[in-house]
Amino acid sequence: MSALITSIRRSAIGLGLFAVITGGTIAVTQSMTEERIEQQAAKAEASALFEIIPETRHNNDLLNDTVTLPASKRLAQEGPVQAWVARQDGEPIGLILPAVAPDGYSGDIDLLVGLNLNGEVLGVRITSHRETPGLGDRVETRKSDWIHSFEGKSLGNPRPRQWNVKKNGGVFDQFTGATITPRAVVKAVQKTLIYFRENRADIIGRVQAGPTGSEEQF
C-alpha cells in the first residue's frame, strides 16, 4: 500500500512538473510569436506607406510625421485616428489614413488610404485580411492590379451611386467568384473620402500645424 501511495505521489509530481514546463514553453513561444507578428505587421505597413506615396514625391520622414485626427465610425475603428503626412520642403502634399472594411467575406480587411489635400485618392493598400486565397486575395498588389483602380478617384469621380462594383451598378470590377471582398473595400474607401470631406478644415489645420504624434487626446 505504501509503495502504491509513493508511486501515485511521484506520478502526480511528474505530471505537475510536466504541466509547468509545458505551460512555460507555450507562454514563451506565444510571446516570441506575437512579437514576430507585430514586427512583420509594422514592416508591411511601412512598405505600404511608401507604395502609396513614394519617397520620390516627398522629402520628410513619413514614418514619424503623424497627426492625430478625430475618431469616426466611418473608418470602422475605435478612438482617435493616427494619420501619416507626406511633405515636400515642409509643405503637406498628402496624408495616409488607416481604415477598416468590417464586411469582408472572412472578416475585417485593414487598409491604408492615401489622399491629397483636395480629397483625391493617391493610392490604397491592403495591410491585413483573411479573404479566400485565389478569390478575395486579389485585393493584394502581388495578386492583381485591382487596388490601383482607386487612384485619382474622389467623391465626385465617380458619382456617389457608382461607388460600387459593376455587378451592383458601380464602376469597379468585381472578382470572378468573389464580389463581397471588392465591394467591402470600395465601400471602405468611399467612407474614408466622406470622413475627409466632413472633417477637411480640421484635418488640414492639424496637418499644417505639424506632427502631433499619438499623445493628443479627444
Image (spheres, helix red, strand yellow):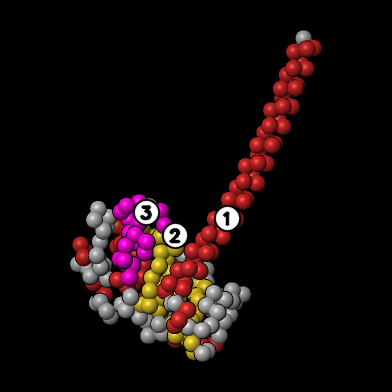
Q: Which mark is residue 131?
A: 3
The Cα–Cα distance between marks 3 and 2, rounded to whole angstroms, is 9 Å
Q: Which mark is residue 178?
A: none
Which of disc 2 and disc 1 is earlier in sequence?
1
Please state which amino acid type lies under the numbered disc 3. Glu
Chain part drawn in magenta: 128-148
In the figure, residue 193 lies in which quadrant? bottom left
Q: Amino acid at mark 1?
A: Arg
Three-letter amino acid code at the position of disc 2: Ser
Q: Is residue 200 visible?
A: no
Q: Is residue 3 left or right of residue 200?
A: right
Residue sitting at the far front = 56
Residue at 50%, 76% in the rendered image: 84
Q: Tag count in the figure?
A: 3
Report the Cα–Cα distance between label 3 and label 1: 22 Å
Assign a secondary structure to mark 1.
helix
Q: Is residue 130 magenta?
A: yes
User: Which of the two residues, 92 or 60, is positioned nearer the viewer here?
Assistant: 60
Would residue 20 be seen by someone viewing this image from the given angle?
Answer: yes
Residue ID at (45%, 68%): 48
Q: Which residue is mark 1?
A: 36
Q: Label 2: which residue?
A: 128
**Residue 11 rendering spot, x and y as whole percentages:** 71, 22
Nearest to N terminus: mark 3 or mark 1: 1
Picture quarter with the N terminus: top right
User: What x and y, as percent, mark residue 196?
Assistant: 41, 79
Q: Residue furthest top?
A: 1
- Label 3 with label 2: CB-CB less than 8 Å: no
